[in-house]
C-alpha cells in the first residue's frame, strides 16, 4: 500500500513538473520578447526572466532524474550528477525569488528605516551584481551538499576508528550547520519582506477607505497584485521549506514512506504553483496568457 502511495506521489510530482515546465517557459519567453521589442527591461522583469529560465531547467533536471532512476536504478553516478544540477538550480531559483521579494517590498512600501532607504537607492542599479551573487550562493550551497554526500558515503564505507569517527562527525556537523545557516538566512529574508509587504497592503487599503477622494488606478492594482502574490507565496513557501527539510533527511532517521510521499508532493507543488501565481498577478503576463487562451478557443 505504501509503495502504491509513493508511486502515486511520483506520478503527481511528474504532472506538477510538466505544468511547471510550461508555465516557467512562458514567463521566460514573454519577458524575453518584451525586452527585444523595447530594449528596456524593468528590474522585476529581469528577475522574473531569470526565475523562469532557472526553474525550467530545474524541473527538467528533476524529470531526467526520475527517468534515470527508473531506467538505471543501480547507476549512482548519473543520478548523483542530476542531483547536483537540481540542487544548484533549485537553490539559484530560491535566491532569485528572495531578490524579487526584496525588490517588491523595497519599491512598494514606504518604510523610512535607513536599511530600506539604502536598499531602495542601490537595489536596481546593482541588480546585475546581485543576480551574480545569487548564482554564487547557489554554487556554494551545491558544493556544501556535494561535500556532505561524499562525507556521509565515506562514513558508511570506511571502517570507523576513534580518531576517524571524530573527524568525520565534526566535518558532517560543520557542513550541516553551514547549509542550515544559509537556508535559515534565506527563509528569514523571504518571510520578513513578504510579511512587511502584506502589512503595507493593509495600511494602504485602510488609508484608501478613509480617504473619500481615493481612487483605484493601474499602479495601485499592480501593487495589490504584488502584495497578493506575497501572501500566496507565504502559503506555498513555508510548507515547502518544512517539507523539503523532512524529505531530505537521511534514511536512517526512519521517516515513513507515506510521510516522504506527502513531502515530495508539497516540495514539487511550490515551484509550479508559485510560477502560476506570478502569471495570475502580473499584468503583462496575465494579459499575454489571456490572448493565447482566447486564440486557442
Image (tube, grey):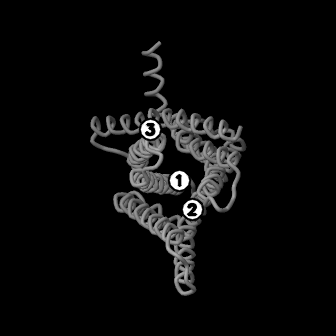
Image quadrant where residue 246 sits: bottom right
Q: Relative to the observer, which residue lies in front, 32 or 69?
A: 69
Q: Which marked residue is nearer to the observer: mark 2 or mark 3?
A: 3
Q: CA distance from mark 3 to mark 1?
A: 18 Å
The local crowd at label 1, few if under 14, some if 14 to 19, many if 20 or more residues have their Cα within 10 Å, is many
Q: Residues within 10 Å of mark 2 (few under 14, many from 20)?
A: some
Q: Residue at x 59, y 60 (%)?
A: 187
Q: Are marks 3 and 1 in contact (CB under 8 Å)?
A: no
Question: Which labelled disc corresponds to residue 24?
Answer: 3
Q: Residue at x 65, y 44 (%)?
A: 261
**Residue 125 image offset from top left, x and y in percent:** 36, 59
Determine which quarter of the picture holds residue 194: bottom right
Based on the displayed image, in which of its 4 quarters is residue 53 positioned? top left
Which residue lies under the disc numbered 2? 189
| Residue at 39% across, 48% down | 50
Depth check, front residue: 130 or 38: 130
The tag earlier along the polypeptide, 3 or 1, is: 3
Query: In front: 71, or 294?
Result: 71
**Pointers 2 and 1 in contact (C-beta within 8 Å):** yes
User: Residue 159 has which mark?
Assistant: none
- Up the image or down, 172 lies above or below 86; here it is below
Residue marked by disc 1: 101
**In the rendered image, is residue 206 in sight?**
yes
Q: Quadrant of the N terminus?
A: top right
Q: Is residue 296 left or right of residue 9?
A: left
* Dot 3 alpha-carbon crowd within 10 angstroms: few under 14, some 14 to 19, many 20 or more: many
Where residue 86 appears, as percent x and y from the top left, is 45, 51
Q: Secondary structure at mark 3?
A: helix
Can the viewer see residue 114?
Answer: no
As helix, strand or loop, the secondary structure at mark 1 comes to helix
Query: Residue 231's spot in the image, x, y percent?
Result: 64, 46
In space, the residues marked 2 and 1 are separated at their CA atoms by: 9 Å
Amino acid at each position: 500500500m505504501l509503495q502504491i502511495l509513493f508511486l502515486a506521489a511520483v506520478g503527481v510530482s511528474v504532472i506538477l513538473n510538466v505544468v511547471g515546465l510550461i508555465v516557467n517557459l512562458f514567463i521566460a519567453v514573454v519577458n524575453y520578447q518584451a525586452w527585444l521589442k523595447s530594449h528596456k527591461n524593468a528590474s522585476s522583469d529581469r528577475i522574473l526572466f531569470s526565475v523562469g529560465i532557472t526553474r525550467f531547467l530545474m524541473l527538467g533536471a528533476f524529470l531526467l532524474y526520475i527517468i534515470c532512476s527508473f531506467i538505471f536504478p543501480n547507476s549512482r553516478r548519473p543520478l548523483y550528477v542530476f542531483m547536483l544540477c537540481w540542487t544548484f538550480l533549485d537553490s539559484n531559483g530560491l535566491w532569485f525569488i528572495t531578490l524579487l521579494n526584496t525588490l517588491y517590498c523595497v519599491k512598494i512600501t514606504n518604510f523610512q528605516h535607513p536599511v530600506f532607504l539604502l536598499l531602495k537607492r542601490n537595489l536596481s542599479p546593482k541588480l546585475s551584481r546581485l543576480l551574480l551573487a545569487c548564482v554564487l550562493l547557489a554554487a556554494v550551497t551545491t558544493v556544501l551538499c556535494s561535500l556532505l554526500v561524499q562525507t556521509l558515503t565515506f562514513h558508511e564505507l570506511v571502517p570507523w576508528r576513534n580518531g576517524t569517527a571524530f573527524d568525520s562527525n565534526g566535518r558532517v556537523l560543520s557542513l550541516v550547520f553551514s547549509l542550515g545557516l544559509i537556508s535559515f538566512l534565506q527563509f528569514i529574508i523571504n518571510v520578513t519582506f513578504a510579511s512587511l509587504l502584506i502589512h503595507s497592503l493593509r495600511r494602504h487599503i485602510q488609508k484608501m477607505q478613509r480617504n473619500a477622494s481615493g481612487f483605484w488606478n493601474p499602479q495601485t492594482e499592480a501593487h495589490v497584485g504584488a502584495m497578493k502574490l506575497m501572501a500566496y507565496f507565504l502559503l506555498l513557501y513555508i510548507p515547502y521549506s518544512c517539507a523539503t527539510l523532512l524529505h531530505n533527511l537521511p534514511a536512517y532517521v526512519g521517516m515513513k514512506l507515506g510521510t516522504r510521499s506527502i513531502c515530495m508532493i508539497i516540495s514539487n507543488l511550490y515551484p509550479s504553483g508559485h510560477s502560476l501565481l506570478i502569471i495570475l498577478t502580473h499584468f503583462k503576463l496575465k494579459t499575454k496568457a489571456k490572448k493565447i487562451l482566447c486564440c486557442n478557443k
